[in-house]
Amino acid sequence: MAELDDIYYINLIRGGDTNAFVYLVRRYQRMIFTIVAKIVNNTNDAEDITQEIFIKVFQSLDKFRGDAGFSTWLYRIAYNTAISEIRKNKSIHTSFEDHLSAVGEEVLSDAIDDISTEERLRYLDEVLNMLPPEDALLISLFYLNDHSVQDISVITGLGVSNVKVKLHRIRKFMNFEINKLISE
């Protein structure tokens, strides 16, 4: 139903009713801001980039073909714009994969089962902040925003199998780091 609403408003905008764009902004601004904020790690920059994204979307709405859902198309623009901004600012993050080699394939501790939900959330937040922005975004898109692997592939430009592998490695890293924090 939401996609039908989006198409309805897109058609209004294409027909000249520019005020209809407000609907799309209100519907997606929070999600776009969240995606951008995860990548750039700065609230002020995230707000500016979010505005820039909606300007780009408005200006290129005629290029939306409907091959994917509007939200997927919009998230792709948001992702690319935020990543471009990071590259412009040369903000470099080391990949967690550099540290993952120390984890190995051994079975990781299940100590997380023995702690409270509040502690779990605190550790999870701490470990999410350790991830490079692109990896944190993958986890957020998949688990917090319920996007499919296919959608994430379209949004990020990564292949489906690459998304699956990255999600697996990120989960493994997060499990290791959470267990490390618990044992400390």
Image (spheres, rainbow, N blue to C red):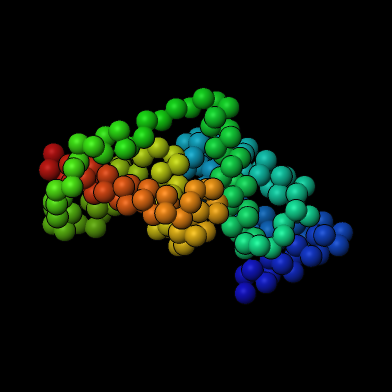
Task: Residue at the far right: name it.
Answer: 16
Q: Residue 113, located in which quarter of the rendered image?
A: bottom left
88 sits left or right of 176 in the view: right
39 horizontally vs 127: left or right? right
Residue at left offset 75%, top offset 49%? 60
Q: Is residue 124 visible?
A: no
Q: Percent from the top left, x then y, of residue 124? A: 29, 48
Residue 136 in picture, x, y percent from top left: 41, 45
Task: Please name whichever residue, 17 or 106, is drawn nearer the observer in this view of the structure.
Answer: 106
Q: Quadrant of the C terminus?
A: top left
Does 163 sit left or right of 111 as displayed? Answer: right
Q: Is residue 136 above or below residue 65?
A: above
Quarter of the figure that contains the N terminus: bottom right
Q: Measuring from the top left, give residue 90's x and y in whole percent.
A: 51, 25
**Image position of 5 (left or right of 75):** right
Closer to us: 82 or 97? 97
Q: Is residue 77 visible?
A: yes
- Residue drawn at x 55%, y 52% is 155
* Residue 78 screen position, x and y as percent: 60, 46
In the picture as drawn, the residue positioned furthest to the top comes out as 90
- Residue found 23% across the figure and 42% down from its top: 177
Query: Which residue sits at x=71%, y=49%?
Result: 57
What is the count of numbered marks? 0
